[in-house]
């Protein structure tokens, strides 16, 4: 049962082959049995899950239908869940029970999805390895000595290990696409504003975007359908109709213009990954796509710009955790300043503290023009590069990551080495564009992802290209040994 995709589950439930309650109990037992190896969950919500599953079964018995009605999922632990711990991977929020549901959580619950639990993540979504979590590192089911990627490493490891079919995640600089690549999943970061950020604990508000992690493009379409849409509680949410994503999965790729940026194949890319990317290009050519070399000349400036903008926004967003309003409070403060200092010093881990300091520095008088303003100008140049490229092509294709998943601990002493791994993903966040990663093969037994980027609101195009590719390849069907 645990091998089924969301699409298969929807068919099975519609055909009354099993109930949501049965499936939910099977998956909860599987999580209890196997997750100790992975550490992909921070909280399990067993009672809520069984209650939601029973309610979904009752709705089906009353004639209701829907792809998500009775579908088991989990939420990254930065989506607020009413009355349930929402930790954001931090000691700061270990004792925090959200007073309301995030819009994404509420929408999926209304569609009948069943919440099995809350998944592990890098603290406040800062990281690419899921090693900064206060709840401990997550292991990659493909090789337990390796990281699953981050920051949505818990969602990725759980779905890859067949503990559940799909999970929500968020992507500020690659946190959906990079863990998808590292664990052989399909993950989609939507256009900025497509999915509501209300109730999603903020890291860098101008970059954060929620999206689906699943095994197939077909499943990402189903989950995105339940997440996307205008929300008046989020001022950057876009009031555009949500297309039927599953209906866009049947389009031919004949004549599809795919741009391959020449800057992507620089010295930093593992040559074995480059070869797998070439194979996927050939596969798409066989399906009728036309390949064109393009250029994204400002790509080299994207990492430094991102690592000024994201920490700057984080330093502002995280100022709300002051030991007074929510979260951790130190024992016996001597005065207000001591309360702030010790609560924050104890509650935040080293990576979060590093980024708050970098961000506060970049925003301070005297440095604002030199760093923050400059980074914003680079951001515009990065966006302009994409706008020029999309005049000539329909999709941009390249690797998701320069290397496969690294060993646990390998980059802990050198944060910049980890930041450099984000080179292919962060440009889409800076520009606000949608991006998808899908399985493209293996290097030393570790999965490799190919990334597709599209113009604003063309999530349907990304999902269709990935679906056509998955109809003709079987990388996405491979299962990690032991799971
Ligand atoms: N690795 C990037 C960072 O640490 C992206 C994280 C994310 O997308 N949340 O900022």
Image: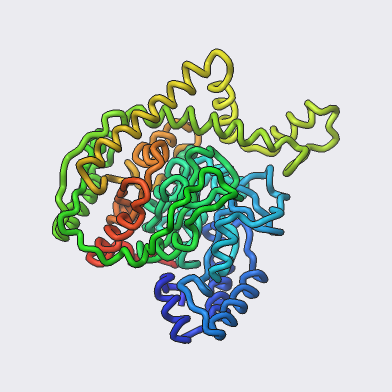
In front: 466, or 182? Answer: 466
The residue located at (55%, 13%) in the rendering is 366
The residue located at (26%, 33%) in the rendering is 296
Q: Is residue 139 above or below residue 34?
A: above
Q: Position of residue 334 (x, y in %)?
A: 85, 28
Q: How many marks?
A: 0
Q: Is residue 460 above or below residue 377?
A: below
In front: 30, or 377? Answer: 377
Residue 114 in the figure: left or right of residue 145: right
Taking the view exactly as shown, the residue that stands out farthest to the top is 366
In front: 270, or 2? Answer: 2
Quick check: can you spot residue 98? yes
Q: Quadrant of residue 351?
A: top right
Q: Quadrant of the C terminus?
A: bottom left
In front: 138, or 467? Answer: 467
Q: Position of residue 363 (x, y in %)?
A: 56, 22
Residue 358 in the figure: left or right of residue 336: left
Q: Position of residue 297 (x, y in %)?
A: 26, 29
Q: Is residue 263 above or below residue 99?
A: above
The residue located at (57%, 50%) in the rendering is 232
């Amino acid at each position: 049962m645990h091998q089924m995709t969301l699409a298969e589950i929807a068919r099975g439930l519609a055909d009354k082959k099993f109930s949501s309650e049965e499936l939910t109990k099977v998956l909860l037992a599987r999580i209890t049995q196997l997750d100790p190896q992975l550490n992909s969950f921070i909280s399990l919500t067993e009672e809520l899950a069984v209650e939601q599953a029973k309610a979904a079964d009752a709705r089906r018995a009353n004639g209701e239908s829907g792809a998500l009605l009775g579908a088991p999922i989990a939420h990254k632990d930065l989506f607020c869940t009413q009355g349930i711990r929402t930790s954001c991977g931090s000691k700061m929020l270990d004792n925090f029970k959200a007073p309301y549901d995030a819009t994404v959580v509420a929408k999926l619950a209304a569609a009948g999805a069943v919440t099995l639990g809350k998944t592990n993540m890098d603290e406040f979504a800062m990281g690419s390895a899921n090693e900064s979590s206060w709840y401990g590192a997550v292991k990659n089911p493909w090789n337990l000595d390796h990281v699953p990627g981050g920051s949505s490493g818990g969602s990725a490891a759980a779905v890859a290990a067949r503990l559940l079919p799909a999970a929500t995640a968020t992507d500020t600089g690659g946190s959906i696409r990079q863990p998808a690549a590292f664990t052989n999943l399909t993950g989609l970061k939507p256009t900025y504003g497509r999915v509501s950020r209300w109730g999603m604990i903020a890291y860098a508000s101008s970059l954060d975007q929620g999206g689906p992690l699943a095994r197939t493009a077909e499943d990402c379409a189903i989950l995105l359908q339940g997440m996307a849409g205008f929300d008046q509680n989020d001022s950057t949410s876009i009031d555009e109709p949500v297309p039927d994503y599953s209906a866009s999965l049947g389009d031919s790729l004949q004549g599809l213009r795919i741009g391959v940026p020449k800057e992507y194949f620089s010295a930093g890319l593992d040559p074995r990954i480059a070869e797998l990317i070439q194979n996927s290009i050939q596969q798409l050519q066989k399906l009728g796509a036309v390949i064109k070399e393009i250029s994204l000349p400002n790509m080299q400036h994207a990492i430094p710009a991102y690592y000024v903008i994201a920490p700057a926004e984080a330093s502002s967003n995280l100022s709300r955790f002051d030991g007074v309003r929510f979260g951790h409070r130190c024992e016996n403060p001597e005065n207000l300043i001591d309360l702030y200092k010790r609560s924050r010093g104890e509650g935040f881990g080293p990576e979060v503290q590093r980024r708050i300091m970098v961000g506060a520095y970049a925003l301070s008088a005297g440095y604002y023009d030199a760093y923050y303003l400059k980074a914003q100008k680079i951001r515009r140049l990065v966006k302009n590069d994409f706008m020029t490229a999309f005049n000539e092509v329909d999709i941009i294709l390249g690797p998701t990551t320069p290397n496969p998943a690294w060993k646990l601990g390998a980059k802990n002493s050198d944060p910049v080495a980890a930041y450099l791994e984000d080179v292919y993903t962060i440009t889409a966040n800076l520009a606000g564009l949608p991006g998808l990663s899908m399985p493209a093969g293996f290097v030393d037994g570790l999965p490799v992802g190919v990334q597709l980027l599209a113009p604003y609101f063309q999530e349907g195009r990304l999902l269709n290209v990935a679906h056509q590719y998955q109809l003709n390849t079987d990388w996405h069907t491979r299962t990690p040994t032991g799971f």
